[in-house]
Each structure stands twice: as C-alpha cells, then as structure tokens.
Amino acid sequence: MNLQIYHKLRRELEKLGYTVLTSRDKDEFVDFVTERSQMVNKTDADFFISIHFNATGDPGSNRSGVETYIYEADEDYPPKINKDAHDNPLRMSESKRLAENLHASIIKMSGANDRGINGASFAVLRETTKPAVLLELGYMDNPEESKKISDSAYQDKLVAGIVSGIQNFYKTTK
C-alpha cells in the first residue's frame, strides 16, 4: 500500500510540476537505518516524506487514524550519519511546519481519525539532513480500517491531502 500511495502521489505532484525523488520505485528492500537518509542527503530536495501504514501487532485491533511524526532526539538512539544536523533548529522548525501542513490537510481531505503529530527518533527522521516527516496513514490490523485504506478512492483522498499539505507548506514558507 505504501507504493500504491507513492505512485498516486508522484503522478499528482508531477502533474503540478514538482520533481519527485524516491528511495524505491518497486517493492525492494532499502535499509531504513541509513541508506534512505544517505540517498536524501545527497540531493537538493526541499524535504523528505516517509510514507507508511501502521499496525499494533494485535490482529483485530480497533485503533485507527492518521499519525504524523517529526524528529525528537532520544539519547538511546544517537545519530549515526547526521551527528551535526540532526537537531538543527531550522531543520526542526521546518519539519514541524511541514508536519502541521501535511497532517491538517490529510485529516481534512480523508476524514480520518486524527491521532496527532508526534515526536520520535525514527532513523529516517534522525539521519536525514532535510526537513523530514513520517506519515502513518492508517492501521492495517484494524479490519475496518484495513478495508478502507485498501480502497483506491480512499487512497486518492489521502494523496489529495498530502498534495494539499505540500502546496500549503510552500505557500507558508518563511
């Protein structure tokens, strides 16, 4: 489903004239600890968005909704390749602004349960030198939500929210 969202998102963004870079175009393994961040760090990209679907590990869970994550330092997870910029104040504030724009638009367009913007020390957020967010677009182990997030029309709403959030991010550039 991550790739389904990505392909839809890429098509929509390219129609609007955006250049979209990716760490993968097909279902293949890319090391999440540093490889994706190294790829991003070598580009002149404005920001990094990591697309995911959530799971509790409890089949039949009733947890649902969209969560957006930004980097929050954790001494138990020190940066490996981004020691200098991981907590750069500009990167942190731009990540927060990107998260706020994306999250609000996704919730508005999809009608999903709002699980908020949270901080975490996920590797792709910690090791990337660009403003970065990680999107959790719904719970795969909630039977009702799994059906919804598998639906192409609902995925289109998620994508519309991401596109709108990106456009709003650029409109509010400081």
Image (cartoon, rainbow, N blue to C red):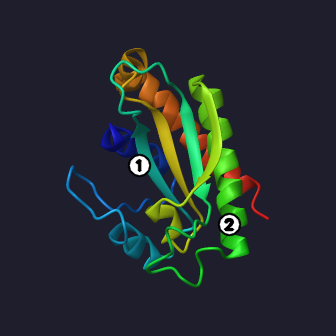
Classify mark 1: residues with Cα within 10 Å, few (<14), some (14-19) or many (20+): some
Residue 109 seen in the current view: yes
In this rendering, would 23 be left or right of 49? left
In which quadrant is the C terminus drawn? bottom right
The amino acid sitting under disc 2 is: Met
What's the CA distance linking mark 1 and mark 2? Answer: 25 Å
Of the pair 129 and 159, the residue shown nearer to us = 129
User: Residue 6, located in which quarter of the rendered image?
Assistant: top left
Q: Secondary structure at mark 1?
A: helix
In this rendering, would 21 be left or right of 161? left
Q: Which residue is mark 2?
A: 92
Q: Which residue is mark 1?
A: 10
Of the pair 128 and 23, the residue shown nearer to us = 128
Name the residue at 60% across, 56% down: 70
Number of on-image labels = 2
Residue 51 % position (x, y): 43, 47
Q: Is residue 162 placed above or below 152 in the rendered structure? A: below
The amino acid sitting under disc 1 is: Arg
